[in-house]
Amino acid sequence: MLPLTEPQIRASFVNCSRGEASKLTLPADVDDTPWDRLDYYGWIDRKAPLRAYVVVTVDDAPVGIALRAPEDAAKRRRAVCAWCEDVYATDEVSLYVARRAGASGRNGDTIGTLICTTFGCSRNVRRIPRIVEAGDDPEGVVLRRIEGLRERSARFAEEVLRGI
């Protein structure tokens, strides 16, 4: 992912107002983010834990999406993340819901998906594959996982944008 500045991150949001984007709480360590190891940028709002945000690259442009986080962690079930599809990190997956962009979002239209609760997908896809997953091509498996994560997260962002 290309490095983003705070103003770029705030300007990228498509499913909230400019005022809401200007007030959202960014992680304290934005400047120290290892952008070259990320396929999208995601975080939970430390001041309002039921809010979360992701910035996904779509057509070489950042698309920010405000998410609603699960209200009750005790109701989480084991599941596979729809973005990274890691079959080993199934305990920390949550349903996140995003308001669609534009008029449909203002009218209450939403879309949801299962995502790693703390947005660890980029780390998961770079995990060294087990022999049963990789055979004799572990590097190829990792590259395919990374590409799949980028495609699936961008597809979700495109669905949010369909509200425009």
Image (tube, rainbow, N blue to C red):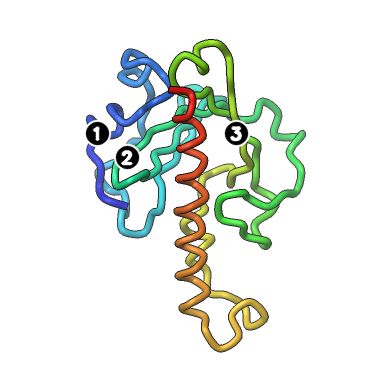
Residue 70 position (above or below residue 60): above
Mark 3 lies on residue = 96
Q: CA distance from mark 1 to mark 2?
A: 8 Å
Q: CA distance from mark 3 to mark 1?
A: 23 Å
Residue 112 position (above or below residue 131): above
Q: Amino acid at mark 1?
A: Gln
Quadrant of the image occupied by residue 97: top right
Mark toward the viewer: 1 or 2: 2
Q: CA distance from mark 3 to mark 2?
A: 19 Å
Mark 1 lies on residue = 8
Q: Amino acid at mark 3?
A: Tyr
Q: Position of residue 133 (x, y in %)?
A: 63, 76
Q: Position of residue 22 (x, y in %)?
A: 30, 19
Label 3 element class: strand
Q: Around disc 1, counting alpha carbons within 10 Å, would you say few (fewer than 14), some (14 to 19), or many (20 or more)? A: few
Among numbered discs 3 and 2, the one appearing first in the sequence: 2
Residue 62: which disc?
Answer: 2
Q: Around disc 2, counting alpha carbons within 10 Å, would you say few (fewer than 14), some (14 to 19), or many (20 or more)? A: many
Quadrant assignment for the C terminus: top left
The residue at the point 52 percent across, 50 percent down is: 152
Among numbered discs 1 and 2, the one appearing first in the sequence: 1
The residue at the point 45 percent across, 70 percent down is: 143
Q: Amino acid at mark 2?
A: Pro
